[in-house]
Image (cartoon, rainbow, N blue to C red):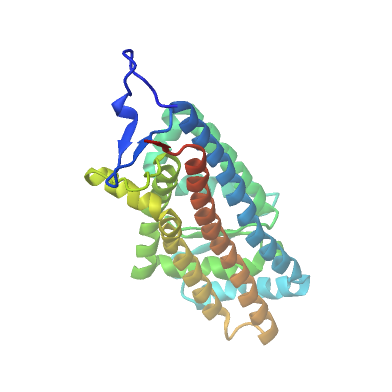
Amino acid sequence: MTSLNADGSANKNNIIMTANGKKYEKPGLAKTALGIVAANVAAGMIMDGTGKLGNLYFKKINASVTDAQQQAYKNVVDDVLIKSGLAQKGVTLVDITEENKDTFKKIVYEDISPNLKRSLKEQPYVKEIFDKKVEKMTSMVAKGKQAYHFKSNNVITINKDKLSVAAFHEMGHAVNNFSKYGRMLNSLKGPASSLASLVLLTALFKRKKADGEKPEGWFDKTTTFIKNNCATLMFATQIPKLLDEGLASIHGAKLTKNVLSPDNFKMLKKFQFSAWSTYLATAVALSVGTVAASKIRDYIAKPEEIKQ
């Protein structure tokens, strides 16, 4: 229904006149809000579900690493750190278990940026959220389900008994940290993450253009371009992370090529590819979820043609 002014005339602010002579009524606030909420919920479900598919593959490969193989990786991990030259450059590897997991928390808090440290002191709610995140990270590392390389202080944290197979990938991140190309990729990940948020917000809040409607002004043109290409742009924001993780795996494999037996080296590469596939699955999930959000929002809240 076309909105009317007090005198019964059509509200021109809600009418779209297109180049092909058609008239459309803009979606109202209620429809727009419903479209955004529904699209956001659907996108979250799609992203979560698609991302889990990659994690299932990783868990399957991780479970196939035998205890004997984990022991073989553990036996050489310290030697690889030294022979690679990383130890001489200041890289340290800390074995995190349930008994010393507070050490991991200390490493995390030492690694954070000055800005975040200030926020934790000045904003209690930020500290509460961050503390919960650190607690979860700590549990994952102590249980042998995750490993980290902290680039600012060059510390690798891992449970050697349960996840030594992942130590070499983290060493690969350390190698990246000492290379110009690796540092460039790391510097791009922050801005890329901000751009990903911008693409998703545009997909959710930008109204679909009516048939024949042209964008006006640079802002409208820019957001229309983002809206129309949101899937591709979202995937592009994940490329720095995909390249960084892939490069870390390549470097990690090179460090062990002449150290491990052929079978253990083959399993290491398989493990690293499965880990990288989780990042690829996340990139795909973000792209699929973003375009789905855009289409659902458009389906619910779109301009309605006014028949002449």
Q: Along the horizontal axis of the image, is 3 left or right of 251? A: left
Which residue is painted at 50% across and 56% down in the image? 287
The residue at the point 59 percent across, 38 percent down is 132
**Front residue of this view, candidates 210 and 20:** 20
Tell me if residue 165 comes above or below residue 108 in the rendering. Answer: below
Q: Residue 147's spot in the image, x, y percent? A: 59, 59
Residue visible at 49% across and 75% down in the picture: 251
In the visual, does 215 lie left or right of 305?
A: left
Splitting the image into 4 quarters, where does residue 27 fall?
Answer: top left
Camera-side residue: 102 or 218? Answer: 218
Relative height, residue 185 to residue 130 (above, below): below
Outermost residue toward the front in this view: 308
Which of these two is toward me, 72 or 270?
A: 270
Q: Position of residue 189 (x, y in %)?
A: 41, 56
In-image side of 51 versus 189 (left or right): right
Quarter of the image where the C terminus is located: top left
The image quadrant of residue 77 is: bottom right
Give residue 243's position: percent from left, percent from top.
45, 68
Question: On the rendered image, what quadrant is the N terminus found in?
Answer: top left
- Residue, far top: 6
Residue 107 percent location from the top left of the image: 52, 49
Q: How many marks?
A: 0
Q: Residue at x 57, y 80 (%)?
A: 256
Q: Residue at the right extreme?
A: 67
Figure quadrant of residue 235: bottom left
